[in-house]
Image: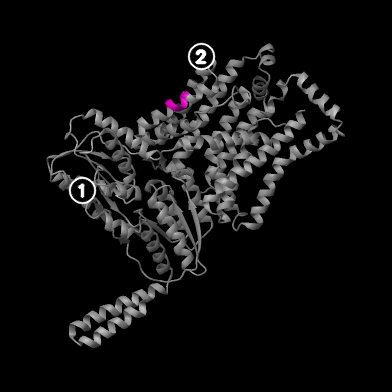
Amino acid sequence: MTDDTFSGVNRRNLLKLTAVAGVVAGTGLLSARTAAAEEGLSLKGKRIGISTAGTDHFFDLQAYNAQVEEVKRLGGEPIAVDAGRNDGKLVSQLQTLIAQKPDAIVQLLGTLSVIDPWLKKAREADIPVFTIDVGSVNSINNSTSDNWGIGKDLALQLVSDIGGEGNIVVFNGFYGVTPCAIRYDQLVNVTKYFPKVQIVQPELRDVIPNTVQDAFTQITAILAKYPEKGSIKAIWSAWDIPQLGATQALTAAGRTEIRTYGVDGSPEVLQLVADPNSPAAADVAQQPAELGRVAIRNVARYLAGETLPRETYVPALLANKQNVGEVSKKLGIG
Amino acid sequence: MLVDAPYIPASVIEIEAQKAFETGKPGPAFGRQLATIALRGGALAVFIGVLVVFSVTAPFFLTVGNIGNVLGQSAIAGVLAIGLTIVIIAGGSNVVTGGIDLSLAANMGLSAAVYASLVQAGHGDGLAILGALGTGLAIGAVNAAAVTLAGIVPLLATLAVMNVVAGLELVLTQNTVVPASTDFLAALSAGGPFGIPVLAYILLGFTLVVAAIVQYTPLGLRLYAVGAFPDAARAAGLPVKSFVAGSFLASGLCGGLAGVLSVSYLSGSTTGAGDMLLPVVVTALLGTVFSRRLVPTITGTLLSALFVGFLINGFQLLNISSTLVSGVQGLLILLVVSATTLLGRKENA
């Protein structure tokens, strides 16, 4: 693969023989070299601690499994622990992980205030800490989707879909989770410039577990409170599991004029977006497996002596009614 | 339950003995003796066996730091389970009609939320500690009133209180994480002397104090009497209801204390305290197999909490896939409990 690119570039270089082609070839060579270096990455003999807040959602399961696979692929030994969305268990596991003195710890998700003191303890024990979707000062590198971009794209899609005016219902139960906070802030930033768009107060609190049932119940109650069509234009949530419950509630109540918006690209929600009759309007799909692989490759780079940027962004893809087919294909979902 | 043996009518025992005699099995007495020995040492032997296996196979297991970690990690569940044990001792250990406090985990959640909210509101640790312990005690008082004054079965009374308390926590925290960091909390969650976490010392100290009271004072003896032989205790002039009410107050206080520990461990109050309930109940029930006479004891509950803690820790150190841990753990508990139950039945027969 790499060799092909390499020779391909050279051939083109020879054919064109222009200064421009020279520049192109130069960049080509450069990228080919990085790719080669990438293939040379190794975690041989390294023990990598992988800690996750849970694996009960599509996003974290994909990222978690991809991390474990990538560590194995690079010849390392993963020590993988799953807290099952229990903060006490998460802290205990991190504590034990620190005692195991792995060559690095990668933390996937988790409430910052709960885990940060323990990430700090890991750092103090000279264990390099990496994170996925956790903006901690104690992490060397955070692999994440560009949540500012995600939040902005989703908010703009929403505002444009509803014609720049109307009431929107917002789930804001996880402002303590950094990516959710950024996405929410971006929604507020965008709606600030559309004075006719109002966030319905009080905001709703999405919960874990029973997220879908709870969102269903809460939205059903909201619909009863706002019975006239047009009194609510859209429902926004920082991830797409509340969106799933909200969409189901809208369908059940026959209020399909209201549109729903969320983030994560869970297959069941993408399916709803693909359904022309469903109120699910858009879902920004992250690439969780890619996030997991990127994080592990960053660990290998760091252990090989490279300097890493503070954050590594993996592109997210906004799926709406028009392009959901392409996005699903790109994510490798049915 | 095992400790209900005293309630089994003599006739039942006679019938059992008769059966054994008629079937002509050789030496039930000999079997019983063996079973008793196996039973008394059995659970402890399993515990020690598990420790030995982990020590040999799991790297880092047999280090002071790791053992300290397990002690510290068991502190919150341990304190709650000890509170539950006091209620079981005073109420009798029939799972359905005996003493039980299902509100303990929710109590811890609300107490922690009160602590974290007070700190967030700018109050000091002193007031926050009082708030948390007061919350726990108040919940204990409600339980006590529901059981002794209204006469509701503890299982139902504390189930109802659990729901009320969980609801109050939701109202207070809006189901969000309330971060709290103070010097006191940091000191609690830090490492103490010999690299052992402060929480570990708290668990050991707390167990020591409660065990001394429950197992070595006249008060403790009466507590056991009230639970095991309520009629006899009443006839002897013991205020049975006061003892039962007192046990709920004590367990409420344990919930408050666990709340304080949890705020320090999790750097605030978090959601999902209810998840602790079943592990705590399992710990308290499993605790009886670590006592010589198969009755709930404080030290037995501590051993049980540590047993569960060491299992989880050992699995992680052995790098056994996290998806397998809870299954294997449940299987082991089932094995230990059924073995001791079967043996216990033999001993009682």
Residue located 56% across and 37% down the image: B78
Residue A290, how many percent across, how many down? 36, 61
Count of numbered circles in the view: 2
Is residue A126 visible to the viewer in this orientation of the structure? no
Left or right of residue B59: residue A17: left
Please name the predominant secondary structure of the magenta segment in the image: helix
Given the image, on which type of amino acid does mark 1 rest?
A: Ala
Provide the secondary structure element on which disc 2 rests.
loop
State the residue at coordinates (63%, 28%): B213
Chain containing the residue with disc 2: B
Q: Which residues are magenta?
A: B160-164
Q: Which residue is mark 2?
A: B150
- Kind of residue indicated by mark 2: Ala
Q: Is residue B145 above or below residue A262?
A: above
Quadrant of the snapshot with the C terminus of chain B? top right
The front one of A318 and B285 is: A318
Classed neighbour count for the residue bearing mark 1: other residues with Cα under 10 Å, few (<14), some (14–19), many (≥20): many
Look at 61% across and 31% down and name the residue there. B210
On screen, residue B130 above or below B263 = above
Residue B64 visible: yes
Magenta segment: does it hold A30? no
Residue drawn at (74%, 40%) of the image: B41
Q: Which residue is mark 1?
A: A155
Horizontal side of B312 relative to A85 (left or right) equals right
Q: Residues within 10 Å of mark 2 (few under 14, many from 20)?
A: few
Query: Residue B305 in the image: x percent, y percent?
Result: 59, 40
Q: Nearer the viewer, residue A285 or A248?
A: A248
